[in-house]
Image (spheres, rainbow, N blue to C red):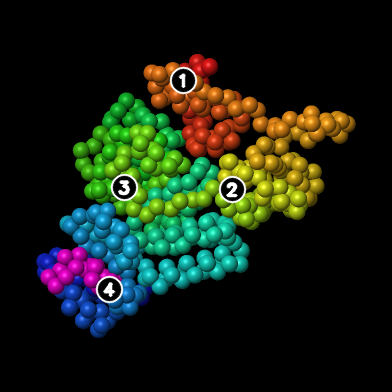
């Protein structure tokens, strides 16, 4: 294994000496500087691969080293700070820092940083490879598409992936938020560690705290053994919290504390543990509307929203539909062992559709059309058409065509109006809206979830709760 060179920049002599002893070993040679002037001299003598940089120095701020980008162009910068703050996170990202070490520095925290060490040039080379793949195949990591809105998303992913900054992904249900999170993880320094995705709307409110933080044996009725939560199982890696607005508010408080302190406790424990995970959160609700509706704490939003990525709905990047459809079809062909192709008419019809269910609906549409196709060519017969009406049974050949003036203007049923009396609870209002929308779309659950802006899992969970009540709202 090649030796790397580390530079510790810290005016605290005892702290710098301790760090030097911890870092020095088989992988690193170490130099120490106590001032900015000394740091610049050390860098001129030998370019460091890793710089552990204290923010407060006698002759200025550690951030001043970023004033000359060429000075540390190929050095991974890890800030040493007395407290992790939102302002520091944003500034660190803007200037190019990769991670934090929070004083007092814990050995496990330092070991994680050293284990994740990668030179910026290596990350840059990987992004260039992905961009080359994008130009030739239309693929960027796990994502497909060459439209302008997606190119912007790829630029954001490339910028943030190599840092430790928290990412907040927004977008309608079915746009691919988990795929973005996975791509960020795979381009990050944490790629060798787990990526765990948690749908906060798919876990019972009574169990979600235990699932996320874990629990001790005997913590509650039925806790017959110790359980490791997602924070422990994702140690060193990335934890993706999808549908964060579905997390109970009391648990949002605890999550905020973890983000601020880097520590958590299992349910039933009095001993805190370090949380060495990167958080990526997502929601299909407009975040500030979620705050106004009381579904998301404002302080948690600000702590999560350090680096926002907004995913465009599929209707705003229809030029990508053909590429995505072919990608899904290639996967089905490989799985089924039979080669089928989309006709030109099928591709044209796909590109003209509104896609209320976004990429997820497109994938399902291609799967259905593949199953229904009788030959090797998939035509438009079983594909969605128009502005949102879904194809069902083909018209009978013998049925006479109705005169133009007698045909209905649309096949979509009359929109039902939901009226609720004053005093209706939010839970009752939500249930009434869900059930009315489900009736309107003839119990097509995917379209219902897409229109409501919730995931299919959340819809199924709500319907299961309503069925358990044994009572249907009018």
| SS at circle 2 | helix
Point out the frontmost of discs 4 and 1.
1
| SS at circle 3 | helix
Mark 3 touching mark 4, by CB under 8 A? Answer: no
Q: Which residues are magenta?
A: 49-66
Q: Residue at x 31, y 66 (%)?
A: 95
Q: Residue at x 66, y 50 (%)?
A: 351
Work out how far the residue at label 2 is from the one at label 1, CA to CA, in angstroms: 32 Å
Quarter where residue 319 is shown: bottom right
| SS at circle 4 | helix
- Of marks 2 and 4, which one's residue comes earlier in the chain? 4
Q: Position of residue 384 (x, y in %)?
A: 68, 41
- Of marks 3 and 4, which one's residue comes earlier in the chain? 4
Q: Which of the pair 408/101 is nearer the observer?
A: 408
Marker disc for residue 302: 3
- Of marks 2 and 1, which one's residue comes earlier in the chain? 2
Within 10 Å of the Cα at label 1, are there few (<14), some (14-19), or many (20+) other Cα atoms? few
Is 341 contained in the magenta span?
no
Q: Is residue 368 above or below residue 262?
A: above
Q: Is residue 320 left or right of residue 60?
A: right
Q: Residue at x 34, y 53 (%)?
A: 306
Q: Which residue is mark 1?
A: 420
Work out how far the residue at label 2 is from the one at label 4, CA to CA, in angstroms: 43 Å
Within 10 Å of the Cα at label 2, are there few (<14), some (14-19), or many (20+) other Cα atoms? some
Marker disc for residue 315: 2
Q: Is residue 137 left or right of residue 188?
A: right
For this orientation, the residue located farthest to the bottom is 45
Marker disc for residue 67: 4
Q: Quadrant of the N terminus?
A: bottom left
């Amino acid at each position: 294994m090649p030796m790397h060179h580390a530079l510790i920049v810290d005016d605290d002599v005892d702290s710098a000496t301790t760090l030097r002893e911890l870092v020095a070993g088989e992988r690193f040679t170490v130099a120490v500087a106590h001032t900015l002037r000394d740091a610049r001299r050390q860098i001129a003598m030998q370019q460091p691969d890793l710089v552990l940089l204290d923010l407060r120095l006698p002759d200025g701020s550690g951030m001043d080293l970023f004033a000359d980008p060429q000075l540390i162009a190929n050095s991974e910068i890890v800030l040493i700070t007395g407290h992790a703050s939102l302002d520091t996170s944003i500034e660190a990202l803007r200037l190019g820092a990769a991670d934090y070490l929070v004083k007092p520095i814990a050995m496990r925290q330092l070991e994680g940083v050293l284990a994740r060490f990668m030179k910026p040039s290596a990350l840059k080379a990987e992004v260039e490879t992905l961009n080359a793949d994008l130009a030739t195949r239309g693929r960027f990591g796990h994502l497909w598409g060459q439209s302008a809105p997606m190119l912007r998303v790829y630029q954001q992913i490339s910028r943030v992936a190599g840092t430790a900054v928290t990412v907040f992904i927004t977008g309608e249900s079915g746009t691919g938020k988990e795929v973005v999170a996975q791509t960020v993880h795979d381009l990050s320094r944490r790629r060798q560690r787990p990526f765990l995705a948690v749908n906060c709307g798919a876990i019972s409110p009574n169990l979600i705290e235990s699932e996320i933080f874990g629990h001790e044996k005997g913590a509650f009725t039925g806790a017959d053994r110790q359980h490791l939560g997602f924070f422990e199982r994702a140690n060193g890696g990335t934890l993706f919290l999808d549908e964060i607005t579905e997390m109970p508010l009391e648990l949002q408080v605890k999550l905020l504390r973890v983000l601020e302190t880097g520590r958590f406790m299992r349910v039933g424990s009095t001993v805190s543990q370090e949380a060495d995970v990167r958080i990526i959160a997502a929601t299909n609700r407009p975040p500030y509307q979620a705050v106004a509706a009381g579904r998301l704490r404002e302080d948690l939003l600000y702590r999560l929203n350090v680096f926002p990525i907004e995913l465009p709905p599929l209707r705003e990047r229809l030029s990508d539909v053909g590429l995505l459809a072919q990608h899904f079809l290639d996967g089905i062909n490989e799985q089924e062992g039979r080669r089928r192709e989309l006709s030109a008419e099928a591709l044209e019809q796909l590109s003209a559709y509104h896609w209320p269910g976004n990429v997820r609906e497109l994938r399902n549409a291609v799967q259905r059309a593949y199953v229904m196709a009788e030959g090797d060519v998939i035509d438009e017969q079983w594909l969605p058409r128009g502005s949102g009406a879904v194809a069902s049974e083909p018209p009978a050949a013998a049925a006479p065509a109705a005169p133009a003036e007698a045909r209905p203007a649309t096949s979509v049923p009359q929109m039902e109006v939901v009226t609720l009396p004053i005093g209706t609870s939010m839970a009752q209002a939500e249930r009434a809206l869900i059930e009315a929308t489900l009736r309107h779309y003839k119990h097509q659950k995917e379209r219902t979830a897409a229109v409501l802006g919730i995931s299919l899992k959340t819809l199924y969970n709500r319907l299961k709760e309503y069925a358990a009540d044994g009572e249907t709202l009018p």
